[in-house]
Amino acid sequence: MKLNELIKNIEISALQGSAAVEVSRIEFDSRKVTAGTAFVAQRGVHVDGHNYIEKAVNSGASVVFCEEIPEVLSGKAVFVQVPDTNFVLGELAAAFYNYPSAKMKVVGVTGTNGKTSIATLLQRLFMQQGYSVGLISTISYRINEHEETASHTTPDALKIQQLLAEMEKAGCEFCFMEVSSHAIHQKRISGIQFAGGIFTNITHDHLDYHKTFAEYIKAKKAFFDALPENAFALTNIDDKNGLVMLQNTKAKKYTYANKAMADFHCKVLENHFDGMLLDIDGQETWTRFVGLFNASNLLAVYAAAVLLQQDKVEVLAHISNLQPVQGRFETIRSLDGKFAVVDYAHTPDALKNVLSAIAEIRTKNEQVITVVGAGGDRDKTKRPEMAEEALKASDKVILTSDNPRTEDPEAIIKDMENGVQAQYKNKVVSITNRHEAIKTATLLAQPGDIILIAGKGHETYQEINGVKHHFDDREEVRKCFGIEE
């Protein structure tokens, strides 16, 4: 593709060289640059791509997009100065792949909790309805039945556009994707034409990155502020910040709620370990999900499907056939009647939601034993809150290691122990080794008791000192229960 074609819809500050030069690929990693590459010098959190311009040019870059043109390299490549290289990467990638998002309906899901469930369930529902559908989620990237393991909640702008182009080639009519606050702030979603956006909820998380809760809310809101007039903005008004997301959006505004009056409403009629009976917009529907938070997720799925012009009755029929997402309130029953729930809950609010779902079902004649940790190199403020939420709703709590990453796991647990109030000290124990923690919980449990293993869900690894070791909470539980794979 010629450079002049690539930049025809992009704001540029200056062009040094010929716009007729050929561009064979786009890269933001100087190590991947070859002859004919357009190198985009992004300013990252830890690395500034401007420091690698010379390396990229020496590796054959024919074009360099940058915010400052280095005088020393003048004449060795075509330089395009732009106001914001982070934003322009997505715009360039979209142009390079011929704007794939414009040829399908892309719906983004953002919020602290529920993103994976809602995006994945929407993809499954639309596939049940006979559509060709793509998915970009924390767990995987999917094009119909083809699946690729995900590396990030929201991948980089180049990867997104590449995935969308593959989806377009496969005939996808819809794509449902998780949109993280990091991705919004880092402008990884630039170049995507969204048909709709869904807000789930917002609680304290990622403050290691955003620094303040106000900045975290601002990042989420920026996604809705950028939606076009022909898109829909669907928000959960059971969350006190739900309406904030709609304040400045140009998109058509819709609300959903379990508790408040809203455009789309849901009520839990019955709640059991094997599912719930819901009233969704006046229609009774049996689902295989458990807990009020899942009722909210299913309502968002229903509302989005209706806003995408799907028949209400058919949507409800398909919702009743949907299975829970991997590692989200995934239940395992032992041969002697102990219940284990494996869930990805890794924020205080998510943990509270899962324990509330268990409380809605339990008879009070059984124990709830919770195994929980907190991730390393992440928001430290939530660590004592995780312990506090676990203790408020459990009979016994085992504090353990999650993904310590580069931190000392025992130091992380000590941070969690700061949330243990005096009246709870007799029902908490700390076991650093996660395998031993899960094993201890299963030994403490009696038939009928409920064991919650929280924090990792679908993950099949534990990251220690920067190395990922195989570890799967579900496998550990099955081993302890004596259940063959």
Image: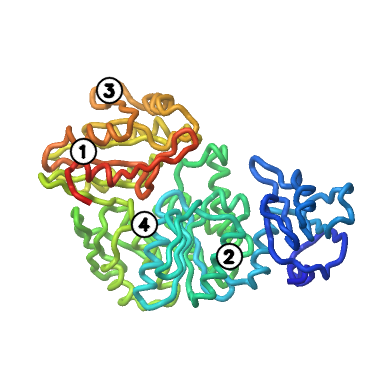
Q: Residue 213's x, y, as percent?
A: 53, 41
SS of the residue under disc 1 = strand
Mark 2 closeness class: few <14, some 14–19, many ≥20 residues within 10 Å: some
The colouring scheme, among rainbow, by chain, secondary structure or one colour, is rainbow
Q: Which mark is residue 260?
A: 4
For the residues labelled 4 and 2, the Cα–Cα distance comes to 40 Å
Proximity of marks 3 and 4: CB atoms separated by less than 8 Å: no
Q: Is residue 470 left or right of residue 426?
A: right
Q: Earlier in the sequence, mark 1 or mark 3?
A: 1
| Nearest-to-viewer mark from 3 and 4 | 3
Alpha carbon distance from label 3 to label 4: 37 Å
Mark nearest the camera among 1 and 4 is 1
The amino acid at mark 4 is Ala
Report helix, strand or loop for mark 2: helix
Say which residue appears at 22% left-offset and 62% top-offset: 277
Q: Amino acid at mark 1?
A: Val
Q: CA distance from mark 1 to mark 4?
A: 30 Å
Q: Which residue is mark 2?
A: 162
Residue neighbourhood size for the residue with mark 3, other residues' Cα within 10 Å, grouped as few (<14), some (14–19), many (≥20): few
Residue identified by numbered label 3: 425
- Choose the circle earlier in sequence order: 4 or 2: 2
Q: Which residue is mark 1?
A: 368
CA distance for labels 2 and 1? 45 Å
**Up-down relation of residue 429 to residue 319 (above or below):** above
Q: Is residue 183 left or right of residue 325?
A: right
The answer to whether the residue labelled 4 contacts the one labelled 2, judged by CB atoms less than 8 Å apart, is no
Closer to the N terminus: mark 3 or mark 4?
4
Give the amino acid type for the residue marked by disc 3 in the picture. Answer: Lys
